[in-house]
Amino acid sequence: MLYEAFKLALKAIRRNKLRSFLTVLGIVIGVAAVIAMVTVGNGTTAKVTSEISKLGSNLLFARPGQFGPGRASTTAKSFNARDVTAIEDQVTGLRAVAPLTQSSQTVIFGGESRTSSITGTNAAYLTALDWDIASGRGFLDSDERGGRAVCIIGQTVRSKLFGSTDPLGQSIRVGKISCEVIGTLARKGQSGMGSDQDDVVLMPLRTFQRRIAGNTDVAVVVVSARDGVSTSKVQSDLERLLRERRGIIAGKEDDFTVNDMTQMLETVTGTTTLLTGLLGAVAAVSLLVGGIGIMNIMLVSVTERTREIGIRLAIGALEGQVLTQFLVEATVLSLFGGLAGILLGLGLAFATVTALGVPFVVSPAIIILAFAFSAAIGMIFGYFPARRAAHLDPIEALRHE
Amino acid sequence: MSEAPLIEFRDVAKVYGEGEARVAALDGVSFTIDTGEFVAIMGPSGSGKSTTMNILGCLDTPSSGEYLFAGIPTTTLERAQLTLLRRHMLGFVFQGFNLLARTSAVENVELPLVYRGMEAAERRQRALAALARVGLSGRADHTPSQLSGGQQQRVAIARAIVTDPAVLLADEPTGNLDTRTSAEIMELVTALNREQGITVIMVTHEPDIAAHARRTIRFVDGRIESDEERAEPAHAL
Ligand SMILES: Nc1ncnc2c1ncn2[C@@H]1O[C@H](COP(=O)(O)OP(=O)(O)O)[C@@H](O)[C@H]1O
Ligand SMILES: [Mg+2]
């Protein structure tokens, strides 16, 4: 019986191809939006995740203020160089501890200039991030202690400012100061979030604080745990030490945050989740509109086919059999919409993902979900028209027209 | 069970509309029909013939009075039970043919079997046999619009008999047909009655068609004017 209903449904849909197509357009758009969104989102997440695993899962980031999905406060007081030293001395199992302060500055050499990210840090920073020196040298203790005006430049800065000229030993202008290029960094490429990681200038923390920032703040402390050392132990040691140093009494909340990479990622994707939710709402509305479209067209269909329904009922169809027929028809219609939406969505996602240079990650779960969802829409919105068909009085229906 | 007549109308009335528009389509009609009978129903247009057929076919219900099928008062049956009664006991040939448009002859004939849940191969075989019975073997794949009036009427008859019903109800089955086609259809109906023992109740207003039946009930203004048996029914031409 279900098979018969299925055959009839296909026949009815084929009979009204254009109308059927227009009817399911809402479903097509809704499903396509969801599929495209989720697929692109999956690709981006996959890329970010793979980069993080390249960076190593043993990194911890301490920042002043409270961060986390849905909350951010930056009113807490900054870290300083003494905090960094204290961490080096008192937390065990560490491979590298690096302070980090950043600002955007104009970098000039010869006739070329560009705005790049300037980072004040130390030699341990490159160790923590497994970042190699491509040419020249890294920071020496004397550079750091003396706050010397030296810098290491990323590959983008090198190629944009120097072209084919050797930058080593040259003086560049960073903001208001002039500093000597002592090294270049190995190429890192785009970050998972799409920013150019090679568009950087590194200088010793003290130089940055004195000559650029004009204060002694440290924005972030990057800590790399030694292999085999549990990051959660390091994390709690770090938190204990920082609470002590910042004079936070028991029972009061931290005024700083220590995250590992996955937690950082969650903070970052927190905003994407919001965006996904918003687009999801748009998709839901368009699916609802699609459902109403199906209900409308099924009601029209029931009216048009009143006589046919009368014949079926008169000839021995039970109410349930007529109900099934129309329910199956609405469901098949909606499933076609879902299928078209899935294909369209995957197509859109593929185009987007290719443009972004992100992997194409198809999630079978979301496809099954989209399919199930469109079937459910057909059933829910097809029920009322189908019930109307089933409840027709056969003799009245036969007199129709 | 065996004492009860197959069909019994007890003082059946059917009223349409209210007030000014009130029409008494049937006004106290009583009769019984036994298994194996061949009854012609005659009468002028608007006398209540189709109304009677619709009630007999359990498609419509009396406003008052009672219709008993095999002794069972049909008013006590629920909608689904009436559907099952129609499905298993009754074959209906409508005044208009009431075939499904854009659907082949054989699929039209199969339809009652589909709802019985019969499997496709057996269904097809029985539908083709019924079409052969009405002389339409070569037209199984034609849709109603590709068939003449007489051929459509035969498809309608094939659909009514494909289920081997106990009762064949036919409302003016030869209404729009030429004399020769009418004669062929009457021959078929007579044969179904004689050879298969199907009870036939048929509406017609042509006396020579009614002459095939052993019994004629004549309606006037929603009442039975006469109910006569004939000793020797006519044979088909
Ligand atoms: N659905 C209906 N609504 C109102 N009046 C009806 C309806 N069906 C039949 N009638 C009236 O009932 C009477 C009997 O109709 P019907 O049984 O169709 O007559 P016949 O088949 O003998 O020509 C007619 O007067 C007709 O107008
Ligand atoms: Mg009539």
Image (cartoon, coloured by chain):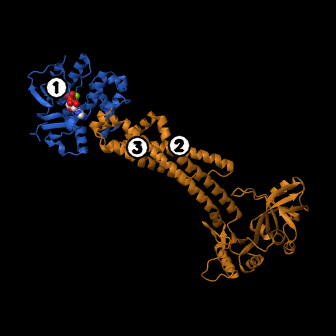
Q: Residues within 10 Å of mark 3 (few under 14, many from 20)?
A: many
- Chain of the residue displaying label 1: B
Image location of residue A298, percent across then percent down: 41, 41
Does label 2 lie on the same chain as label 3? Answer: yes
Q: What residue type is labelled 2?
A: Ala
- The hue of chain A in the figure is orange
Which of the labelled discs sits on residue B83, or is there none?
none
Chain of the residue where label 3 is placed in the rendered structure: A
Is B172 positioned to the left or the right of A190 in the image?
left
Query: Considering depth in this image, is A287 or B165 the residue closer to the camera?
Result: A287
Cα distance, mark 1 to mark 3?
A: 44 Å
Chain B tint as drawn: blue
Q: Does the residue labelled 1 lie within 8 Å of ligand 1?
A: no
Residue linked to disc 2:
A340
Amino acid, disc 1: Met
Toward which corner of the image does residue B190 lie, by quadrant?
top left
Q: Is residue A172 above or below residue B144?
A: below
Residue A77 in sight from this viewpoint: yes
User: In the image, what residue type sits under mark 3?
Assistant: Val
Helix, strand, or loop for circle 2? helix
Structural distance between the alpha carbons of marks 1 and 2:
58 Å
Q: Which mark is residue A328?
A: 3
